[in-house]
Amino acid sequence: MTLAHLPGRADRVPALTALLLSLGLAGCVNLAPDYARPAPAVPRAGLASAATPGPAADGVAATSSAASASGTAGSATTTDLALPDWRAVFLDDRLRDTVALALRQNRDLRIAALQIEQARAAFRQTDAQRLPTLNASGGASRSGAAGVTTQQVSLQLALSSYELDFFSRVRNLSDSAAQALFSREESRRGTQISLVSETAAAWLTWAADLERQRLAQETLASRERSLALTRRRHELGAISGLVLSQAETALESARADAVVWPTTLEQDRHALELLLGTALPAALEPRAADAAGTLSQLVDLPAGVPSSVLQRRPDVLAAEHSLIATHADIGAARAARFPSISLTASAGTGSRALSGLFDAGSGNWSFGPSVSLPIFDGGSRAAALRQAEASRDIALATYDKTIQTAFREVADALSERATLAARLAAQRALLASSERQLRLAEAQYRVGSTTQLDLLDAQRSLLGAQQSLIALRLSEQLNRVSLYKVLGGGWQDVTPMAPDTAPNASPGAVATPAAAAGAGVADSAVPRPTGAAGATN
Protein backbone atom coordinates (compact mmCIF):
# COMPACT_ATOMS: atom_id res chain seq x y z
CA MET A 1 0.00 0.00 0.00
CA THR A 2 1.42 3.39 -1.01
CA LEU A 3 1.21 6.64 0.84
CA ALA A 4 -1.66 7.77 -1.40
CA HIS A 5 -3.80 4.77 -0.41
CA LEU A 6 -3.57 5.47 3.31
CA PRO A 7 -6.76 6.94 4.76
CA GLY A 8 -6.54 10.71 5.10
CA ARG A 9 -3.08 10.88 3.48
CA ALA A 10 -3.93 11.35 -0.21
CA ASP A 11 -4.44 15.09 0.18
CA ARG A 12 -1.02 15.42 1.79
CA VAL A 13 0.99 13.95 -1.09
CA PRO A 14 1.16 17.10 -3.28
CA ALA A 15 2.10 19.24 -0.29
CA LEU A 16 4.81 16.79 0.78
CA THR A 17 6.14 16.56 -2.77
CA ALA A 18 6.24 20.34 -3.05
CA LEU A 19 8.07 20.55 0.27
CA LEU A 20 10.71 18.02 -0.79
CA LEU A 21 11.15 19.77 -4.13
CA SER A 22 11.56 23.17 -2.50
CA LEU A 23 14.15 21.76 -0.08
CA GLY A 24 16.03 20.22 -2.98
CA LEU A 25 16.06 23.51 -4.85
CA ALA A 26 17.09 25.36 -1.72
CA GLY A 27 20.12 23.14 -1.46
CA CYS A 28 21.33 24.54 -4.80
CA VAL A 29 21.65 28.10 -3.51
CA ASN A 30 25.28 29.23 -3.49
CA LEU A 31 26.00 32.70 -2.17
CA ALA A 32 29.64 32.74 -3.26
CA PRO A 33 30.46 35.38 -5.90
CA ASP A 34 31.18 34.15 -9.41
CA TYR A 35 34.87 33.73 -10.18
CA ALA A 36 36.48 34.91 -13.40
CA ARG A 37 40.22 34.69 -13.99
CA PRO A 38 41.66 38.22 -13.85
CA ALA A 39 43.40 39.56 -16.93
CA PRO A 40 47.20 39.51 -16.53
CA ALA A 41 48.32 42.84 -15.03
CA VAL A 42 51.38 43.11 -17.28
CA PRO A 43 52.72 46.00 -19.38
CA ARG A 44 52.18 44.19 -22.68
CA ALA A 45 50.51 41.06 -23.97
CA GLY A 46 53.59 39.34 -25.36
CA LEU A 47 57.17 38.67 -24.33
CA ALA A 48 58.61 38.10 -27.81
CA SER A 49 59.66 41.75 -28.15
CA ALA A 50 62.00 41.27 -25.21
CA ALA A 51 64.18 38.88 -27.20
CA THR A 52 66.01 40.08 -30.30
CA PRO A 53 68.24 37.16 -31.19
CA GLY A 54 71.79 37.86 -32.23
CA PRO A 55 74.15 35.75 -34.29
CA ALA A 56 74.83 32.21 -33.18
CA ALA A 57 78.14 31.78 -31.42
CA ASP A 58 79.86 29.28 -29.15
CA GLY A 59 77.00 26.80 -29.10
CA VAL A 60 74.22 29.37 -28.72
CA ALA A 61 71.46 28.71 -31.23
CA ALA A 62 70.03 31.92 -32.68
CA THR A 63 66.27 32.11 -32.81
CA SER A 64 65.08 32.99 -36.29
CA SER A 65 62.84 35.96 -36.91
CA ALA A 66 60.29 33.60 -38.42
CA ALA A 67 60.14 31.64 -35.19
CA SER A 68 59.65 34.85 -33.24
CA ALA A 69 56.89 35.89 -35.59
CA SER A 70 55.15 32.56 -35.28
CA GLY A 71 55.42 32.81 -31.51
CA THR A 72 53.28 35.96 -31.58
CA ALA A 73 51.09 35.23 -34.56
CA GLY A 74 48.07 34.32 -32.51
CA SER A 75 46.81 32.45 -29.52
CA ALA A 76 46.09 29.35 -31.57
CA THR A 77 49.83 28.85 -31.99
CA THR A 78 51.36 30.37 -28.87
CA THR A 79 49.04 28.73 -26.40
CA ASP A 80 50.18 25.33 -27.66
CA LEU A 81 53.74 26.09 -26.61
CA ALA A 82 55.11 23.60 -24.11
CA LEU A 83 58.46 23.35 -22.41
CA PRO A 84 60.13 19.94 -22.37
CA ASP A 85 60.59 17.86 -19.29
CA TRP A 86 63.81 18.53 -17.38
CA ARG A 87 65.24 15.20 -18.56
CA ALA A 88 65.13 16.55 -22.10
CA VAL A 89 66.57 19.91 -21.10
CA PHE A 90 69.72 18.46 -19.50
CA LEU A 91 71.27 16.01 -21.93
CA ASP A 92 74.51 15.37 -20.05
CA ASP A 93 74.06 12.06 -18.24
CA ARG A 94 75.99 13.12 -15.14
CA LEU A 95 74.02 16.34 -14.80
CA ARG A 96 70.73 14.50 -15.37
CA ASP A 97 71.59 11.88 -12.75
CA THR A 98 72.61 14.61 -10.31
CA VAL A 99 69.24 16.33 -10.69
CA ALA A 100 67.44 13.00 -10.29
CA LEU A 101 69.39 12.37 -7.07
CA ALA A 102 68.32 15.77 -5.75
CA LEU A 103 64.67 15.04 -6.53
CA ARG A 104 64.91 11.83 -4.51
CA GLN A 105 66.81 13.15 -1.52
CA ASN A 106 66.16 16.89 -1.11
CA ARG A 107 64.48 17.68 2.21
CA ASP A 108 62.66 20.81 1.03
CA LEU A 109 60.87 18.72 -1.58
CA ARG A 110 59.97 16.14 1.06
CA ILE A 111 58.52 18.87 3.25
CA ALA A 112 56.47 20.19 0.33
CA ALA A 113 55.10 16.69 -0.36
CA LEU A 114 54.19 16.20 3.30
CA GLN A 115 52.44 19.57 3.32
CA ILE A 116 50.27 18.28 0.48
CA GLU A 117 49.30 15.28 2.61
CA GLN A 118 48.53 17.66 5.46
CA ALA A 119 46.32 19.82 3.22
CA ARG A 120 44.61 16.73 1.79
CA ALA A 121 43.76 15.51 5.29
CA ALA A 122 42.41 18.97 6.19
CA PHE A 123 40.26 18.94 3.05
CA ARG A 124 38.84 15.50 3.82
CA GLN A 125 38.09 16.59 7.37
CA THR A 126 36.23 19.68 6.15
CA ASP A 127 34.47 17.90 3.30
CA ALA A 128 33.21 15.24 5.70
CA GLN A 129 30.91 17.86 7.27
CA ARG A 130 28.73 17.67 4.17
CA LEU A 131 27.72 14.12 5.10
CA PRO A 132 25.62 13.01 8.07
CA THR A 133 27.40 11.74 11.15
CA LEU A 134 25.97 8.45 12.39
CA ASN A 135 26.88 7.00 15.76
CA ALA A 136 25.92 3.63 17.14
CA SER A 137 25.81 2.99 20.86
CA GLY A 138 24.82 0.12 23.05
CA GLY A 139 24.63 -0.35 26.77
CA ALA A 140 23.53 -2.64 29.54
CA SER A 141 22.80 -1.86 33.17
CA ARG A 142 21.83 -3.88 36.21
CA SER A 143 20.55 -2.43 39.48
CA GLY A 144 18.80 -3.57 42.61
CA ALA A 145 16.61 -1.97 45.26
CA ALA A 146 14.46 -3.41 48.08
CA GLY A 147 15.47 -6.89 47.11
CA VAL A 148 14.36 -6.37 43.51
CA THR A 149 16.95 -6.66 40.74
CA THR A 150 16.35 -5.03 37.38
CA GLN A 151 18.38 -4.86 34.23
CA GLN A 152 18.18 -2.87 31.02
CA VAL A 153 19.76 -3.51 27.60
CA SER A 154 19.64 -0.89 24.82
CA LEU A 155 20.94 -0.33 21.29
CA GLN A 156 20.80 3.08 19.55
CA LEU A 157 21.67 4.55 16.14
CA ALA A 158 21.85 8.35 16.24
CA LEU A 159 22.15 11.18 13.70
CA SER A 160 23.71 14.12 15.52
CA SER A 161 23.18 17.73 14.41
CA TYR A 162 23.31 17.28 10.65
CA GLU A 163 23.15 20.70 9.01
CA LEU A 164 20.94 21.02 5.96
CA ASP A 165 23.23 23.09 3.79
CA PHE A 166 20.53 25.18 2.11
CA PHE A 167 22.85 28.16 1.52
CA SER A 168 26.03 26.15 0.78
CA ARG A 169 27.92 27.29 3.86
CA VAL A 170 29.50 23.88 4.44
CA ARG A 171 29.98 23.37 0.72
CA ASN A 172 31.93 26.61 0.40
CA LEU A 173 34.08 25.70 3.39
CA SER A 174 34.88 22.45 1.60
CA ASP A 175 35.62 24.32 -1.62
CA SER A 176 38.01 26.63 0.21
CA ALA A 177 39.85 23.67 1.72
CA ALA A 178 40.07 22.05 -1.72
CA GLN A 179 41.61 25.19 -3.19
CA ALA A 180 44.12 25.24 -0.34
CA LEU A 181 45.03 21.68 -1.31
CA PHE A 182 45.46 22.67 -4.96
CA SER A 183 47.62 25.61 -3.90
CA ARG A 184 49.86 23.27 -1.92
CA GLU A 185 50.19 21.02 -4.95
CA GLU A 186 51.32 23.94 -7.09
CA SER A 187 53.73 25.06 -4.37
CA ARG A 188 55.29 21.61 -4.37
CA ARG A 189 55.63 21.75 -8.15
CA GLY A 190 57.26 25.15 -7.85
CA THR A 191 59.66 23.77 -5.24
CA GLN A 192 60.57 20.94 -7.61
CA ILE A 193 61.20 23.28 -10.55
CA SER A 194 63.35 25.53 -8.35
CA LEU A 195 65.26 22.49 -7.11
CA VAL A 196 65.96 21.32 -10.66
CA SER A 197 67.16 24.80 -11.62
CA GLU A 198 69.28 25.35 -8.51
CA THR A 199 70.88 21.90 -8.74
CA ALA A 200 71.81 22.40 -12.39
CA ALA A 201 73.14 25.90 -11.63
CA ALA A 202 75.26 24.61 -8.74
CA TRP A 203 76.67 21.78 -10.89
CA LEU A 204 77.50 24.13 -13.78
CA THR A 205 79.04 26.70 -11.42
CA TRP A 206 81.26 23.98 -9.98
CA ALA A 207 82.37 23.05 -13.52
CA ALA A 208 83.14 26.70 -14.31
CA ASP A 209 85.17 27.06 -11.12
CA LEU A 210 87.14 23.94 -12.06
CA GLU A 211 87.94 25.63 -15.37
CA ARG A 212 88.94 28.79 -13.51
CA GLN A 213 91.23 26.75 -11.28
CA ARG A 214 92.83 25.12 -14.33
CA LEU A 215 93.38 28.57 -15.85
CA ALA A 216 94.91 29.84 -12.59
CA GLN A 217 97.31 26.88 -12.49
CA GLU A 218 98.30 27.40 -16.13
CA THR A 219 98.86 31.09 -15.44
CA LEU A 220 101.04 30.25 -12.44
CA ALA A 221 103.13 27.89 -14.55
CA SER A 222 103.48 30.55 -17.27
CA ARG A 223 104.58 33.14 -14.72
CA GLU A 224 107.20 30.72 -13.36
CA ARG A 225 108.64 30.19 -16.84
CA SER A 226 108.63 33.93 -17.46
CA LEU A 227 110.43 34.59 -14.17
CA ALA A 228 113.08 31.99 -14.98
CA LEU A 229 113.77 33.71 -18.30
CA THR A 230 113.86 37.11 -16.63
CA ARG A 231 116.36 35.91 -14.02
CA ARG A 232 118.72 34.62 -16.72
CA ARG A 233 118.58 37.93 -18.51
CA HIS A 234 119.17 39.77 -15.24
CA GLU A 235 122.21 37.61 -14.49
CA LEU A 236 123.56 38.52 -17.91
CA GLY A 237 122.99 42.18 -17.13
CA ALA A 238 120.46 42.66 -19.92
CA ILE A 239 117.72 43.99 -17.62
CA SER A 240 117.53 45.90 -14.37
CA GLY A 241 116.49 44.71 -10.94
CA LEU A 242 113.19 46.57 -11.30
CA VAL A 243 112.18 44.36 -14.23
CA LEU A 244 113.08 41.28 -12.21
CA SER A 245 111.00 42.54 -9.31
CA GLN A 246 108.03 43.08 -11.63
CA ALA A 247 108.26 39.47 -12.83
CA GLU A 248 108.44 38.22 -9.24
CA THR A 249 105.36 40.30 -8.33
CA ALA A 250 103.45 38.84 -11.28
CA LEU A 251 104.38 35.33 -10.13
CA GLU A 252 103.24 35.89 -6.56
CA SER A 253 100.00 37.45 -7.76
CA ALA A 254 99.31 34.35 -9.86
CA ARG A 255 100.20 32.13 -6.90
CA ALA A 256 97.81 34.04 -4.61
CA ASP A 257 95.03 33.57 -7.16
CA ALA A 258 95.71 29.83 -7.55
CA VAL A 259 95.58 29.01 -3.83
CA VAL A 260 92.04 30.45 -3.53
CA TRP A 261 90.37 27.88 -5.76
CA PRO A 262 90.61 24.73 -3.58
CA THR A 263 88.47 26.48 -0.95
CA THR A 264 86.05 27.74 -3.58
CA LEU A 265 85.66 24.26 -5.05
CA GLU A 266 84.95 22.76 -1.65
CA GLN A 267 82.28 25.40 -1.09
CA ASP A 268 80.79 24.52 -4.50
CA ARG A 269 80.63 20.89 -3.41
CA HIS A 270 78.99 21.77 -0.11
CA ALA A 271 76.38 23.96 -1.82
CA LEU A 272 75.49 21.21 -4.29
CA GLU A 273 75.34 18.49 -1.64
CA LEU A 274 73.01 20.64 0.47
CA LEU A 275 70.61 20.64 -2.48
CA LEU A 276 71.12 16.91 -3.01
CA GLY A 277 70.57 16.03 0.62
CA THR A 278 73.36 13.48 0.34
CA ALA A 279 76.95 13.12 -0.87
CA LEU A 280 77.58 13.42 -4.60
CA PRO A 281 79.10 10.24 -6.06
CA ALA A 282 82.48 10.76 -7.68
CA ALA A 283 81.14 9.50 -11.00
CA LEU A 284 78.70 12.43 -11.15
CA GLU A 285 81.19 15.19 -10.35
CA PRO A 286 81.72 17.79 -13.09
CA ARG A 287 85.03 18.28 -14.88
CA ALA A 288 86.79 21.43 -15.98
CA ALA A 289 86.09 20.63 -19.64
CA ASP A 290 82.33 20.69 -18.92
CA ALA A 291 82.46 24.48 -18.56
CA ALA A 292 82.82 24.74 -22.35
CA GLY A 293 81.65 21.34 -23.55
CA THR A 294 78.12 21.38 -22.11
CA LEU A 295 77.07 24.59 -23.84
CA SER A 296 75.65 22.60 -26.74
CA GLN A 297 74.27 19.93 -24.42
CA LEU A 298 71.51 22.10 -23.04
CA VAL A 299 68.34 22.33 -25.08
CA ASP A 300 67.72 25.82 -26.45
CA LEU A 301 64.50 27.07 -24.88
CA PRO A 302 61.90 29.07 -26.84
CA ALA A 303 62.28 32.83 -26.82
CA GLY A 304 59.07 34.09 -28.45
CA VAL A 305 56.31 33.37 -25.94
CA PRO A 306 53.04 35.07 -25.02
CA SER A 307 52.57 36.50 -21.55
CA SER A 308 49.61 34.14 -21.07
CA VAL A 309 52.03 31.27 -20.42
CA LEU A 310 52.91 32.98 -17.16
CA GLN A 311 49.53 31.81 -15.87
CA ARG A 312 50.88 28.25 -16.02
CA ARG A 313 53.69 28.96 -13.58
CA PRO A 314 53.24 27.11 -10.28
CA ASP A 315 53.48 30.27 -8.16
CA VAL A 316 50.85 32.00 -10.31
CA LEU A 317 48.55 28.98 -10.15
CA ALA A 318 49.03 28.76 -6.39
CA ALA A 319 48.10 32.44 -6.06
CA GLU A 320 45.03 31.86 -8.24
CA HIS A 321 43.88 28.92 -6.13
CA SER A 322 44.22 31.13 -3.07
CA LEU A 323 42.12 33.77 -4.84
CA ILE A 324 39.42 31.22 -5.69
CA ALA A 325 39.42 30.06 -2.07
CA THR A 326 38.58 33.58 -0.91
CA HIS A 327 35.48 33.55 -3.13
CA ALA A 328 34.34 30.40 -1.35
CA ASP A 329 35.11 32.02 2.01
CA ILE A 330 32.85 34.93 1.07
CA GLY A 331 30.07 32.46 0.24
CA ALA A 332 30.48 30.79 3.63
CA ALA A 333 30.46 34.17 5.41
CA ARG A 334 27.30 35.21 3.57
CA ALA A 335 25.57 31.93 4.36
CA ALA A 336 26.34 32.37 8.06
CA ARG A 337 23.98 35.37 8.08
CA PHE A 338 21.03 33.20 7.04
CA PRO A 339 19.05 30.70 9.13
CA SER A 340 20.52 27.25 9.58
CA ILE A 341 18.57 24.06 10.07
CA SER A 342 20.01 21.02 11.80
CA LEU A 343 18.57 17.56 12.22
CA THR A 344 19.02 15.31 15.22
CA ALA A 345 17.46 11.86 15.16
CA SER A 346 17.87 8.48 16.79
CA ALA A 347 16.34 5.05 16.56
CA GLY A 348 16.92 1.99 18.65
CA THR A 349 15.57 -0.67 20.89
CA GLY A 350 15.60 -1.45 24.57
CA SER A 351 14.61 -4.39 26.73
CA ARG A 352 15.03 -5.79 30.21
CA ALA A 353 16.71 -8.85 28.75
CA LEU A 354 19.12 -9.32 25.87
CA SER A 355 16.84 -11.95 24.33
CA GLY A 356 14.03 -9.44 24.04
CA LEU A 357 16.06 -6.71 22.48
CA PHE A 358 14.39 -7.11 19.08
CA ASP A 359 10.92 -8.15 20.24
CA ALA A 360 7.90 -6.26 19.04
CA GLY A 361 7.26 -3.11 21.00
CA SER A 362 10.86 -2.73 22.17
CA GLY A 363 11.76 -0.09 19.58
CA ASN A 364 12.06 3.64 20.19
CA TRP A 365 12.87 6.65 18.06
CA SER A 366 13.20 10.40 18.20
CA PHE A 367 13.41 13.18 15.63
CA GLY A 368 14.25 16.78 16.40
CA PRO A 369 14.92 19.45 13.78
CA SER A 370 16.25 22.75 15.05
CA VAL A 371 16.42 26.18 13.46
CA SER A 372 18.97 28.85 14.30
CA LEU A 373 18.10 32.36 13.16
CA PRO A 374 20.68 35.10 13.71
CA ILE A 375 19.02 38.16 15.24
CA PHE A 376 21.71 40.15 17.01
CA ASP A 377 25.41 39.36 17.24
CA GLY A 378 26.92 42.81 17.66
CA GLY A 379 27.97 42.92 13.99
CA SER A 380 30.13 39.80 14.23
CA ARG A 381 28.80 38.13 11.09
CA ALA A 382 28.90 41.37 9.10
CA ALA A 383 32.52 41.88 10.18
CA ALA A 384 33.34 38.31 9.16
CA LEU A 385 31.92 39.02 5.71
CA ARG A 386 33.93 42.22 5.39
CA GLN A 387 37.02 40.32 6.48
CA ALA A 388 36.42 37.69 3.78
CA GLU A 389 35.92 40.38 1.14
CA ALA A 390 39.12 42.13 2.24
CA SER A 391 40.93 38.78 2.01
CA ARG A 392 39.67 38.44 -1.56
CA ASP A 393 41.01 41.89 -2.45
CA ILE A 394 44.36 41.04 -0.86
CA ALA A 395 44.48 37.74 -2.76
CA LEU A 396 43.70 39.55 -6.01
CA ALA A 397 46.50 42.07 -5.41
CA THR A 398 48.84 39.17 -4.54
CA TYR A 399 47.85 37.40 -7.74
CA ASP A 400 48.55 40.54 -9.80
CA LYS A 401 51.90 41.01 -8.05
CA THR A 402 52.83 37.39 -8.72
CA ILE A 403 51.99 37.82 -12.42
CA GLN A 404 54.03 41.01 -12.60
CA THR A 405 57.00 39.38 -10.87
CA ALA A 406 56.80 36.45 -13.28
CA PHE A 407 56.65 38.83 -16.25
CA ARG A 408 59.73 40.67 -15.06
CA GLU A 409 61.71 37.48 -14.46
CA VAL A 410 60.90 36.11 -17.92
CA ALA A 411 61.50 39.47 -19.61
CA ASP A 412 64.86 39.82 -17.85
CA ALA A 413 65.92 36.32 -18.89
CA LEU A 414 64.86 36.90 -22.50
CA SER A 415 66.54 40.31 -22.58
CA GLU A 416 69.78 38.77 -21.40
CA ARG A 417 69.48 35.96 -23.92
CA ALA A 418 68.95 38.44 -26.76
CA THR A 419 72.55 39.69 -26.38
CA LEU A 420 74.34 36.56 -25.20
CA ALA A 421 75.26 35.33 -28.69
CA ALA A 422 76.75 38.70 -29.67
CA ARG A 423 78.57 39.01 -26.34
CA LEU A 424 80.07 35.54 -26.73
CA ALA A 425 81.20 36.32 -30.28
CA ALA A 426 82.77 39.60 -29.14
CA GLN A 427 84.48 37.92 -26.19
CA ARG A 428 85.94 35.19 -28.39
CA ALA A 429 87.24 37.84 -30.77
CA LEU A 430 88.77 39.69 -27.80
CA LEU A 431 90.41 36.46 -26.63
CA ALA A 432 91.90 35.81 -30.05
CA SER A 433 93.21 39.38 -30.16
CA SER A 434 94.73 39.05 -26.66
CA GLU A 435 96.45 35.80 -27.62
CA ARG A 436 97.91 37.47 -30.70
CA GLN A 437 99.08 40.43 -28.61
CA LEU A 438 100.81 38.10 -26.14
CA ARG A 439 102.59 36.17 -28.89
CA LEU A 440 103.94 39.40 -30.38
CA ALA A 441 104.96 40.75 -26.96
CA GLU A 442 106.85 37.53 -26.11
CA ALA A 443 108.63 37.49 -29.47
CA GLN A 444 109.68 41.11 -29.19
CA TYR A 445 110.70 40.71 -25.53
CA ARG A 446 113.05 37.84 -26.43
CA VAL A 447 114.89 40.01 -28.93
CA GLY A 448 114.84 42.99 -26.60
CA SER A 449 112.60 45.25 -28.69
CA THR A 450 109.96 45.69 -25.99
CA THR A 451 109.89 46.03 -22.22
CA GLN A 452 108.89 43.66 -19.45
CA LEU A 453 105.98 45.95 -18.65
CA ASP A 454 104.52 45.45 -22.13
CA LEU A 455 104.81 41.69 -21.71
CA LEU A 456 103.09 41.76 -18.32
CA ASP A 457 100.32 43.93 -19.71
CA ALA A 458 99.73 41.46 -22.54
CA GLN A 459 99.65 38.57 -20.07
CA ARG A 460 97.14 40.37 -17.87
CA SER A 461 94.95 41.17 -20.88
CA LEU A 462 94.90 37.53 -21.95
CA LEU A 463 94.11 36.33 -18.45
CA GLY A 464 91.24 38.79 -18.15
CA ALA A 465 89.83 37.74 -21.54
CA GLN A 466 90.01 34.06 -20.59
CA GLN A 467 88.31 34.64 -17.26
CA SER A 468 85.60 36.73 -18.87
CA LEU A 469 84.91 34.03 -21.47
CA ILE A 470 84.52 31.40 -18.74
CA ALA A 471 82.13 33.67 -16.85
CA LEU A 472 80.15 34.46 -20.01
CA ARG A 473 79.84 30.79 -20.96
CA LEU A 474 78.54 30.08 -17.49
CA SER A 475 76.08 32.97 -17.78
CA GLU A 476 74.79 31.51 -21.06
CA GLN A 477 74.19 28.11 -19.51
CA LEU A 478 72.62 29.60 -16.39
CA ASN A 479 70.38 31.71 -18.60
CA ARG A 480 68.96 28.57 -20.22
CA VAL A 481 68.39 27.08 -16.80
CA SER A 482 66.79 30.32 -15.64
CA LEU A 483 64.44 30.35 -18.64
CA TYR A 484 63.38 26.82 -17.81
CA LYS A 485 62.56 27.94 -14.28
CA VAL A 486 60.86 31.28 -14.90
CA LEU A 487 58.67 29.86 -17.67
CA GLY A 488 57.37 27.25 -15.21
CA GLY A 489 59.46 24.45 -16.68
CA GLY A 490 57.83 21.08 -17.18
CA TRP A 491 54.33 22.25 -18.00
CA GLN A 492 52.69 20.61 -20.96
CA ASP A 493 49.85 21.70 -23.23
CA VAL A 494 46.51 21.17 -21.49
CA THR A 495 43.31 20.23 -23.28
CA PRO A 496 40.83 23.12 -23.06
CA MET A 497 38.23 22.71 -20.34
CA ALA A 498 34.61 21.99 -21.15
CA PRO A 499 32.17 24.95 -20.97
CA ASP A 500 30.82 23.84 -17.62
CA THR A 501 34.34 23.64 -16.20
CA ALA A 502 35.66 26.95 -17.46
CA PRO A 503 37.70 29.08 -15.07
CA ASN A 504 35.01 31.80 -15.01
CA ALA A 505 32.46 29.41 -13.58
CA SER A 506 31.27 30.13 -10.09
CA PRO A 507 32.71 28.07 -7.24
CA GLY A 508 30.87 24.81 -7.33
CA ALA A 509 30.92 24.33 -11.07
CA VAL A 510 33.85 21.97 -11.44
CA ALA A 511 34.24 18.60 -9.80
CA THR A 512 37.38 18.11 -7.78
CA PRO A 513 39.66 15.41 -9.19
CA ALA A 514 39.46 12.19 -7.29
CA ALA A 515 43.17 12.25 -6.72
CA ALA A 516 42.84 15.47 -4.77
CA ALA A 517 39.83 14.41 -2.78
CA GLY A 518 41.11 10.96 -1.90
CA ALA A 519 39.30 7.67 -2.10
CA GLY A 520 36.08 7.41 -0.19
CA VAL A 521 35.54 11.16 0.14
CA ALA A 522 32.67 12.93 -1.58
CA ASP A 523 33.88 15.10 -4.46
CA SER A 524 33.83 18.82 -3.72
CA ALA A 525 32.63 20.94 -6.61
CA VAL A 526 35.33 23.54 -7.03
CA PRO A 527 36.86 25.28 -10.04
CA ARG A 528 40.44 24.62 -10.99
CA PRO A 529 42.27 27.00 -13.34
CA THR A 530 43.20 25.85 -16.81
CA GLY A 531 46.78 24.62 -16.81
CA ALA A 532 46.73 23.45 -13.22
CA ALA A 533 45.83 19.90 -14.08
CA GLY A 534 48.01 17.63 -16.11
CA ALA A 535 51.18 19.58 -15.51
CA THR A 536 54.27 17.50 -15.24
CA ASN A 537 57.72 18.29 -14.03
Image (cartoon, rainbow, N blue to C red):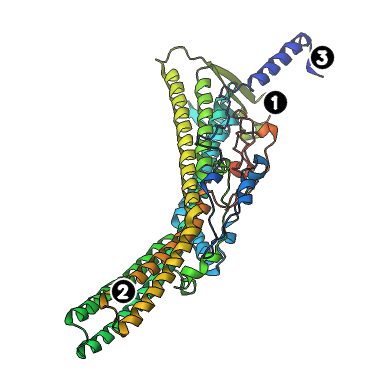
Dividing the picture into quadrants, the one containing residue 356 is top right
Q: Examine the rendering and report whether any part of residue 276 can be seen.
A: no
In percent of the image, x 28 and y 76: which residue is there? 255
Picture coordinates of residue 221 (x, y %)? 33, 81
Q: Look at the numbered disc 2 and give the secondary structure of its residue.
A: helix
- Type of amino acid at the residue the image marks with label 1: Ala
Q: Look at the numbered disc 3 and give the secondary structure of its residue.
A: helix
Contact between marks 3 and 1 (CB within 8 A): the answer is no
- Type of amino acid at the residue the image marks with label 3: His
**Which residue is denoted by mark 1 in the rendering?**
360
Picture coordinates of residue 137 (x, y %)? 56, 34
Depicted 150 relative to depicted 375: above or below: below
Contact between marks 2 and 1 (CB within 8 A): the answer is no
The 10 Å Cα crowd at callout 3, few under 14, some 14 to 19, many 20 or more, is few
Q: Nearer the viewer, mark 2 or mark 1?
A: 2
Pick the front one: 7 or 468: 468
**Which residue is denoted by mark 3 in the rendering?**
5
**Which residue is denoted by mark 2 in the rendering?**
258
Depicted 93 relative to depicted 19: above or below: below
In percent of the image, x 24 and y 79: which residue is there? 247
Q: Examine the rendering and report whether any part of residue 402 can be seen.
A: yes
Pick the front one: 149 or 180: 180
Q: Look at the numbered disc 1 and give the secondary structure of its residue.
A: loop
